[in-house]
Image: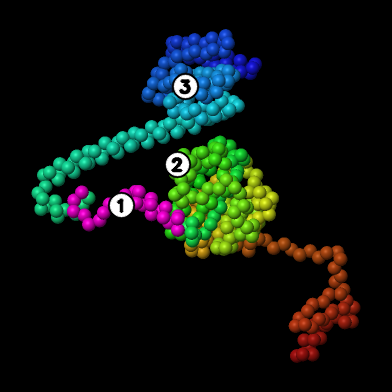
């Protein structure tokens, strides 16, 4: 309670400073933690007039908790103060109820500031997307009007001989829904005849909310890239918790994922309840065993985890605990890693590599899905190898120094399986001059 009061006093002092600069009407009452404010939006990032406190559904966000209500009012005031200071804070219209709840759970002002910056970028992306959509719509309307005027002025004979869209054309238009049905039909065939691949969705508790959102986006990309491939996999999402942040965000990306006709297998149970342990192979980068070729009889498991903060080998520990076989991609064998963002790959990149190695059996072709920024260029890698080989030959040779245990009185050498011993006595030594005189 004392820390909360200090935080409120700090915000109030900042508000008084802004009031002196901008002559805004600010009223703050500390009695019973009531906070009222009304700011001018002169220096706000948003062009539209933002919501004030009354337009944010405080009761729905806090569920009637008085402490949370007070904290939310302080956060609302804090956000408005940061807007007036020129910070990257979005308008309240772009902050949803779930975002307010996440802001309430953040422990510090710096963490909330980073959250505001993230939401501000999202709001600007949304504004740009809406502006581009309206611009394209306007351009299309102008194009339609122009083509209509051209058709009115063209004689029927010339119109019939013009081979173009909206003129004489032998091909029917292929709509996006038709292409979508084609891709879904390929997945339905994969369910019957294709290779099964399991995605373990049981790591949502080990990830932060930001990591869960990123993981959901990667799962969406994985599904999209799998269904457009020549030979798609039969994907099975196991250990699914429908109330988790990961699956709820994935549901926003794929709203039809729970429909019976949708070609995606979602299981709340474990993969151990569906398949035998002898078939399962857990793909984890932390194990020692490398995957040399794609085994069509195996069922590979990919862990749905984004470990930007927690780098612990969770998939390795889980595979050992469940007694499963493990393997990793032979990345070090075929790639020369550079100074990129490490050796970690996204989930959609993993599936793309498996799809191509299953289709072609060529690792050099399959590993083209690894981002170029992570690996060294081929010519640079060749120069590195040549330089390292040259350094091996250019090393200075050290002079041999005999050990004190070596006896020079009894040395031997072996030549063509014949061993000769040179004795140390003077009488047995070879006289070179006498030998040359006798032989001459």
Mark with earlier residue (1, 2): 1
**The magenta segment:** 166-189
Disc nearer the start of the sequence (2/3): 3
Look at the numbered disc 1 and give the secondary structure of its residue: loop
Q: Earlier in the sequence, mark 1 or mark 3?
A: 3
Vertical placement of residue 283 versus 120, above or below: below
Name the residue tied to disc 2.
Answer: 255
Residue at point 47% right, 11% down?
26
Which mark is in front, 1 or 2? 2
Reading the image, the residue beneath label 3 is 56
Q: Quadrant of the C terminus?
A: bottom right
Marks counted in the figure total 3
Mark 2 element type: loop
Residue holding disc 1: 174
Q: Is residue 103 left or right of residue 129?
A: right
Whether residue 333 appears in magenta in the rendering, the answer is no
C-alpha distance separating marks 1 and 2: 24 Å
């Amino acid at each position: 309670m004392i820390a909360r009061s200090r935080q409120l006093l700090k915000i109030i002092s900042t508000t008084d400073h802004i009031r002196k600069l901008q002559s805004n009407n600010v009223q703050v009452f500390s009695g019973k933690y009531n906070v009222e404010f009304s700011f001018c939006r002169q220096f706000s990032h948003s062009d539209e007039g933002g919501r004030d406190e009354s337009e944010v559904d405080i009761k729905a966000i806090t569920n009637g908790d008085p402490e949370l209500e007070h904290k939310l009012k302080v956060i609302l005031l804090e956000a408005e103060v940061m807007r007036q200071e020129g910070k990257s804070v979005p308008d309240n219209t772009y902050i949803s109820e779930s975002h307010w709840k996440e802001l309430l759970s953040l422990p510090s002002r710096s963490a909330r500031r980073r959250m505001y910056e993230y939401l501000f970028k999202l709001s600007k992306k949304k504004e740009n997307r809406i502006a581009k959509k309206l611009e394209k719509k306007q351009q299309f309307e102008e194009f339609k009007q122009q083509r209509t005027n051209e058709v009115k002025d063209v004689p029927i004979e010339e119109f019939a001989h013009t081979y173009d869209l909206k003129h004489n054309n032998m091909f029917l238009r292929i709509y996006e829904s038709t292409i979508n049905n084609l891709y879904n039909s390929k997945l339905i065939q994969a369910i019957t005849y294709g290779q099964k691949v399991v995605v373990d969705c049981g790591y949502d508790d080990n990830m932060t909310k930001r990591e869960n959102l990123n993981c959901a986006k990667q799962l969406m990309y994985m599904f999209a890239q799998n269904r457009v491939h020549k030979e798609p996999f039969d994907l099975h999402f196991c250990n699914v918790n429908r109330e988790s942040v990961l699956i709820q965000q994935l549901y926003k990306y794929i709203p039809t994922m729970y429909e019976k006709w949708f070609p995606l297998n979602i299981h709340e149970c474990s993969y151990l309840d569906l398949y035998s342990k002898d078939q399962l192979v857990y793909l984890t980068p932390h194990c020692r065993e490398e995957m040399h070729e794609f085994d069509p009889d195996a069922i590979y498991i990919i862990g749905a985890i984004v470990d930007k903060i927690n780098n612990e080998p969770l998939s390795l520990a889980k595979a050992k605990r469940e007694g499963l076989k493990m393997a990793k991609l032979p990345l070090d064998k075929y790639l020369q890693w550079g100074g990129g963002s490490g050796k970690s790959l996204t989930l959609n990149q993993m599936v793309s590599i498996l799809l191509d190695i299953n289709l072609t059996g060529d690792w050099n072709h399959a590993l083209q899905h690894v981002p170029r920024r992570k690996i060294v260029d081929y010519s640079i890698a060749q120069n590195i190898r040549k330089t390292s080989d040259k350094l091996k030959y250019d090393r200075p040779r050290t002079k041999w120094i005999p050990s004190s245990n070596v006896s020079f009185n009894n040395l031997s050498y072996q030549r063509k399986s014949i061993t000769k011993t040179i004795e140390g006595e003077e009488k047995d030594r070879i006289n070179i001059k006498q030998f040359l005189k006798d032989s001459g």
